[in-house]
Image (tube, helix red, strand yellow):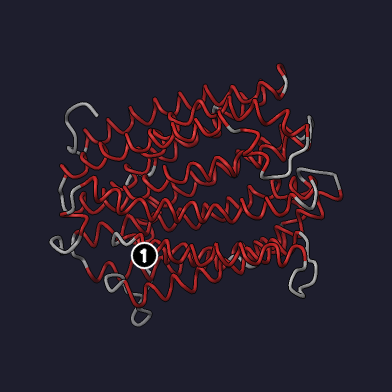
Amino acid sequence: MEKENKMAVMPMPKLIITMSLPLMLSLLIQSLYNIVDSIFVAKLGENALTATSLVFPMQMLMIAVGVGTGVGVNAVLSRNIGAKNTAMVENVAMTGLILSLISTAVFMIMGFTCTRSFVYAFTEDEDIAAYSIQYLSICMIFCVGSLVSTMFQRFLQSVGDTFYSMVSLIAGAVTNLILDPIMIFGLMGFPVLGIRGAAIATVIGQCVSAVVAIWLNAVKNPAVKITWKYYKIDKRIVAQIYKVGLPTIVTQAIGSVMMAAVNGILMPFSSTAVAFFGVYYKLQNFLFMPMNGLGQAAIPIVGFCYGSKNYGRIKEAIRTVLPIGIGISFAATVLFMAFPSRLLGLFSPGREMLAIGVPALRIICITFAFASVTMILGYAMSGIGIGLINMLGTALRQLIIFVPLAYLFAAYFGIEKVWYSIWISETAAMGYAIAASRNLLRKRGIWSGTV
């Protein structure tokens, strides 16, 4: 199997590029769901745009559970594929599918019962609340496409097949892009659905992505089979999945908590500031997707090499992905620094949003290189089976340090100074990620020199 699997024999730079490019494109396409929704919704007015920012933390939580569980399944699958344990591969895949369906059921129930209380916790504006409830309830009740597509995409990625994973995402994103204006504004004979139309277009796109991902696994991925017959859930497999997956879920969910907390900090100052922060976070996520793609490509590569005890390949992988990630982050910094008003201009901003957003984007983008180091090292350590470093690095940069400092800076210096708190949090998180990764690699006997 090692001779046939490109993760064992392909030159590392070529392997990183061939695996990460489809992942980068996939993640960029995935992030378009929220970008496209916000661009079209912004044409309904600033209150509608603010609504999508207010509910974005809950959408991020759904993504966190789907991606985190998928990352855990990916890591366990790739290690067992590297160790040639076919029976275990089948069991892990089946367990991953069941976990994604359980997650779907939980979020559906929350969609029916919790959307109003969540929205009114952040706003008393009835117009904003109405938009928020309409949008969020649809996204949660019909979340099956999002969670199932994520799992089947991870099955493809676990064998190094990131191209077909990208194809399934493209199918969903194109569907969403076509349906958004039709359903929001009532084109081609459809009724005008407004913000509900944006949500409906999103969930239809996710369902299309799921159907394509399931089909591609059936016809293009013989190494990972879904077999119901004789299957019994194994607690040990669930534990292995969530040893990596739970820290990843927490890592992803940290962004959700951070968004909710910062919305709460900014709302007393200005609803426009909340709308801007939502726009910024979606733009940042879009531009960070290439770095996420690099990191996620490292998970199966490091996991496969760790399972086959090829430690030299692990070192080579880390030495390859870090410089590429830093280079991408510099390009994103230049883009934010040079064209902040044009980036914000995609979302039909008013004068107040431009006044808040243009200087804020230029302040924040200075830290992108620091964030890239933290993110990529965290993903690489997840491939070894330790997701804690990724979780703590993200917690430091997005929550533990950033949110308290943002509150203090807003209270004492005003919202125009809030963004400097990101400088402190990103620097501290990068320092932790480097130290923790070096320590783990030395303890495992993978790397005895300087990391």
Q: Residues within 10 Å of mark 1 (few under 14, many from 20)?
A: many
Question: Left or right: 123 with respect to 397?
Answer: right
Indicate whether 268 appears above or below 47. above
Question: Left or right: 193 with respect to 234?
Answer: right
* Residue at x-position 25% and y-position 56%: 79
- Position in image of residue 277 (x %, y %): 66, 37
Query: Please, which residue is most extreme toward the right here?
Result: 126
Identified by mark 1, the residue type is Phe
Query: Please, which residue is most extreme toward the left here?
Result: 3
* Residue at x-position 57% and y-position 56%: 62
Query: Please, which residue is most extreme toward the top here?
Result: 412
* Residue at x-position 70% and y-position 50%: 52
Instruction: State the residue in front, 46 or 98.
Output: 46
* Residue at x-position 38% and y-position 56%: 22
Q: Secondary structure at mark 1?
A: helix
Instruction: State the residue in front, 17 or 375.
Output: 17
- Position in image of residue 169 (x %, y %): 48, 62
Q: Tell me the quarter of the image containing the N terminus.
A: bottom left
Question: Left or right: 19 with respect to 349?
Answer: left
Instruction: State the residue in front, 384 or 426.
Output: 426
- Position in image of residue 128 (x %, y %): 81, 49
Q: Tell me the quarter of the image containing the C terminus.
A: top left
State the residue position of label 1: 155
- Position in image of residue 98 (x %, y %): 45, 69
Q: On the image, which quarter does residue 275 sit in?
A: top right
Image mark count: 1
Query: Please, which residue is most extreme toward the bottom here?
Result: 229
